[in-house]
Image: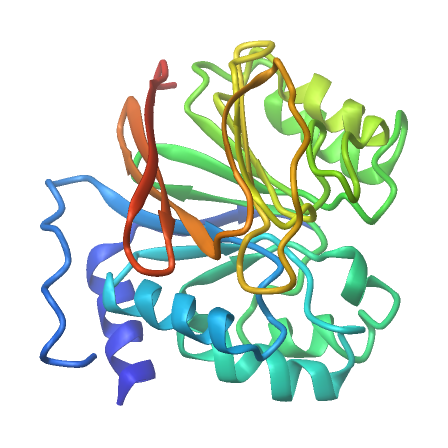
Amino acid sequence: MAQAGLSIRLAAALALVALAGCGDSAEPAPATRAKGEAVVWAVGDGADGSGPARRLARAIERDRPDALLYLGDVYPDGTPEDFALRYQPVYGGLAGLTWPTIGNHEYANRASGYNPYWRRHDRAKPWYRVRLAGWEVFSLNSQAAHGPGSPQLRWLERRLAGADGNCRLAFWHRPRYSAGIVHGDAPDVAPLWDALAGHARLVLSGHDHAMMRYRPHDGMTEFVAGSGGATLYETRPDDRLAFSRSGVTGGLRITLAPGSARLEFRSVDGEVLDRSRTRCDPA
């Protein structure tokens, strides 16, 4: 019943169009959306079957989102068993609303784990784009080749060439910039970042298990939301950061609307830890 309800709401409330590409009654009602808005949650590194991950997933479900961007990592190795025992019990109820990107933990076993699981929901492309509430949303792949001349980068550059406006959001697993003490910056994904500069406003990633919001750079603001429930990491001081929080399970709630976005980091208990907003130029 829950899955059917989500599917009906998806058909009625979303304008999610694939373009190209290789409750508990005691819970408070979710906030009312204005016409043309979509509520999107983004979170990664939570598919470990743990109690905190399950609590966060239930909180997201109660908010009745229009979409979930899963930022990667199914633990420990993204095998079929890991998807069945660690992803499905946590985020399976939102699978029909989910737009995923692959993480480093499941990449080696993608042929038997990630791809078959997401093929059932028509989400198995290695990179793709959708439209949502006036925004163009790109799911990119920090595990597949993404350097100069790679198929992924050529695909992205073709779709940005001559494109108007900058109401675009991109997400992939390993962040270009990160103050996490475990992983930190990923300079190798610079080609993806550089291709989006001037064409996008928001970039989202996981990988480091904390919450971070960076100051705008190259016209884009990066958010790291790898705080989905797996073992949490600490962060180091970083002058590039506008906000960071470690040691707290939570996710990023985004309200997209034509020409704007409102973003909140929320803890698993519903506390708003950080608020920000951005405007963009529609195509």
Position of residue 16 relative to residue 258, above or below, is: below
Judging from the image, the colouring scheme is: rainbow
Please name the residue shown 64% across and 78% down the image: 117
Query: Considering only vertical position in the picture, is 84 above or below 164?
Result: below
Query: Percent position (x, y) of residue 119?
Result: 63, 73
Residue drawn where x is 24% and y is 68% of the image: 62
In the depicted structure, whether residue 43 falls above or below residue 159:
below
Instruction: Where is residue 115? Give x, y as percent.
Output: 72, 71
- In this view, the residue in front, 102 or 270, is 270
Q: Is residue 136 left or right of residue 145?
A: left
User: Is residue 110 placed above or below 35 in the rendered structure?
Assistant: below
Count of numbered badges drawn on the protein: 0
Instruction: Specify the quadrant that holds the N terminus.
Output: bottom left
* Residue 258 in picture, x, y percent from top left: 26, 28
- The image quadrant that residue 232 belongs to is bottom right
Q: Residue at x 72, y 29 (%)?
A: 176
* 120 sits to left or right of 168: right
| Residue under the image location 69 percent in, 27 percent down | 177
Give the position of the C terminus as an image quadrant.
top left
Q: From the viewer's side, name the closer residue of 175 and 259.
A: 175
Which x, y percent locates residue 93? Answer: 41, 78
